[in-house]
Image (cartoon, rainbow, N blue to C red):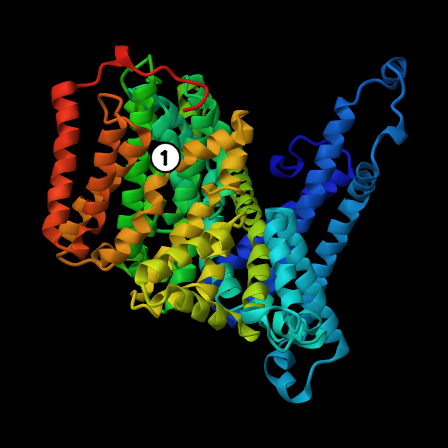
Amino acid sequence: MPTFVAERVPRRLTPLVVLNALVTLLAITFTVWTIYYAYSLMWMRLRFSNVFLGLGLALYYLDVVRTRYEEAESAEQATPDPAAMNASGPTSVSNRGLFARIREGYDRIDPYIALASAVLALAATAYVELNFQRLHQDVHLAGHTQMDLVVGVVLIALAIDATRRAFGNIIAAVTVASIAYAHTAFAMYLPGVLQHIGYDWTRITREGAIELTGVYHDTLMGIGSTWVAIFIMFAGIAKAYGLMDFVLEVGRELGKTLKTGVVQIAVIASMVMGSITGSAAANTATTGSFTIPMMQDQGIRDDFSAAIESVASAGGQMLPPVMGVAAFLMADFIGVSYLEIVQAGIIPAVLFYLSVGIGIHFAVLKFGWTSPNVGSFDWRLLLNGIHFAVPLGVLLVTLIWLRYTPLTAGLYTIITIFVVGSLKLVVVDALEASRADSGPTSVKSGVAWAFKECYRVFEQIALALRRGGLEMAPLVGVLAAMGVIIEMLTFTGLAPRVSTSILGIGGGMLFVVLFLAMIASILFGLGMPTPAAYVLVVVLVVPGVTEMGVPEIASHMFVFYFAMLSAITPPVAISVAIGARIAGTSFVKACLQALRIGAPGFVIPFAFVVNDSLIYWSQETLLAFPVVLAGTVALIVATIGFDGARNLSYPVRGFYVVAAFVAMFGSLVSVVLQVVAAAAIVAALGYAKTVIGYDDSHTEASPTSD
């Protein structure tokens, strides 16, 4: 049995072996189905999305069952000998609380619930597929059957449950609340702007699913099953071929050559992976499990280690070309080309990451957390991953030069990584065989060697296809659930009423409207994946901002930025919570440091609204970018309290804060003010660097909290 099926399991036919095989088969089918659609485009996107939804949900639920069986098997192997347990005294069941016993009972039946949910997902989407023509066209005259409505309820329930399992209770609760809000039982009793006439379960079920809306939302599921899926699957395939391991290996090696050690490498790795995954929490959990211990080994304080990883993981959502999959959603919402969104996102991302990188650099110097073993970088290490440059080059050429759609560009990129990954595998094996003088010496041995290599290549491709499907599967439920939320908010008329209220409270003052939009974006984003938070604020907040004359892309970027920053904003701060758990430190302390490091991020969106040439490139960008960059650097210097050479007093920090705001917003009065402020910031930092200089013998002691 291939290792990707039977990895770490016995060869006898056990439930775990069967589940591994089923998950592998379904994951490969899921990925191949998406790749084939990208190649052929022979189905209507809505019809493709239905099959995609069924396969994705079924795969996710089967993987949940497989994981539970693996955990149970591991627990069995780790269980002490019963005799030893009896010797130490029996544990009284009555000592456990009622909730614990209910939870225990639910855990026992949960795998069966998940398995039934997988079957239901396939059955419900098969029903829609078999009745697609009627549901898509004829139903408006003939009406829905009772079975249609039952299938609709099943699809909505599966979307909510899959979201709860994959992303926690918050977004699932928001979905349930949106359905309750739409129902007539609650609608008439709501206050003010929230009140509406209300709808019955039949209308909610039709709007939520069976009219091929809601869970089949054209933008969320339509773009999610194509543009988003192809890139998420590419990320999974690249991981299977060792991209993540290569990045971390290069990071460790490069960390030996930098005075600040592995810190900047942790930032870069988290930034790149965050752009692809679209979930700050997932990124913190995956890359943080490697980077946080690396930073702690260097001597960086626990709360700072957690904060650095959390901010870098959250900010990755802003990084083009993927932008945490929100770039594709944004292009579809606004109705502009994908490249326009990528271009608009470049300078805000650069501003954020340069400010974060400089802030972390100064923090390391301030507390003396510098790396003791500064050496030379072994450039030969890059040869291990040079083949990854080929698919990335194909991606850039097809997207930027040839201007293919993201779906087509992703298709060619996946094909390329399969080709170069397979070639590398064969070439490396051939070189090792020749060095060991164990290469084929006869026709027979040559055929055997070729057969073995073919088997290894196909096994690696199957493993990559499996990984690609498993990476995408958890997102399917949340895309469907967000479609339900948007449909409920739209057809009840809440979205325009919220936008009107924001405008009314703002009193026609742009800053007040932007501030209210910031608060709303952060609140709506708490605990949610960034793409889901962005979609919610687009519907509720963006119309109010654009009504104030803010250009459309800038409005979308503004709310998206704050939805992204909700991952490091208390009281939820989901990214920080995960980072703090990995680092073994206080959540509150880690939150405080994350807010210090990410402070410029809360000001940058206001800056690119005022200086819109940062979004819409023009000749003014050549001036606006450096002066706003100087302002963001000054702001991070003030929050860290260090300028690269000395600890700063509060009056000096105040100078940097004032200079920062003038450099970022001085154009409201005169561009000359911006230039003067930026020049003063550069002069002050240059003086600290060249005249005073950094002396590591006078670093500030690292307190338990700072």
Report the side of 140 relative to 43 (left or right).
right
Q: Can you give x and y, in whole percent of width and height, for residue 419 in the image?
A: 41, 45
Residue name at image x 16 percent, y 24 percent:
689
Q: Is residue 301 above or below residue 493?
A: above
Q: Is residue 131 above or below residue 259?
A: below
Q: Residue at x 43, y 61 (%)?
A: 329
Q: Quadrant of the C terminus?
A: top left
Residue 557 quadrant: bottom left
Query: Dot 1, crowdedness within 10 Å: few (<14), some or many (≥20)?
Result: many
Residue drawn at the location 43% of the way across and 63% of the way down: 541
Q: Quadrant of residue 379?
A: top left
Q: Element under label 1?
A: helix
112 shown above or below 299: below
136 or 673, which lies in front? 673
Residue toward you, 348 or 215: 348
Residue 683: % across, % down: 12, 33
- Residue 249 makes an appearance in the image: yes
Q: Residue 341's spot in the image, x, y percent? A: 32, 59
* Residue ID for mark 1: 597
Residue 592, x across and y down, in percent: 44, 33
Q: Residue furthest top?
A: 697
Q: Residue at x 43, y 49 (%)?
A: 564
Give the farthest residue toward the bottom. 141
User: Horizontal placement of 582 versus 272: left or right?
Assistant: right
Asked if residue 237 shows in the view, the reply is: no
In front of the other: 253 or 639? 639
Which amino acid lies under the numbered mark 1 shown in the image of this protein? Ile
Compare residues 255 and 102 and report the one nearer the observer.
Answer: 102
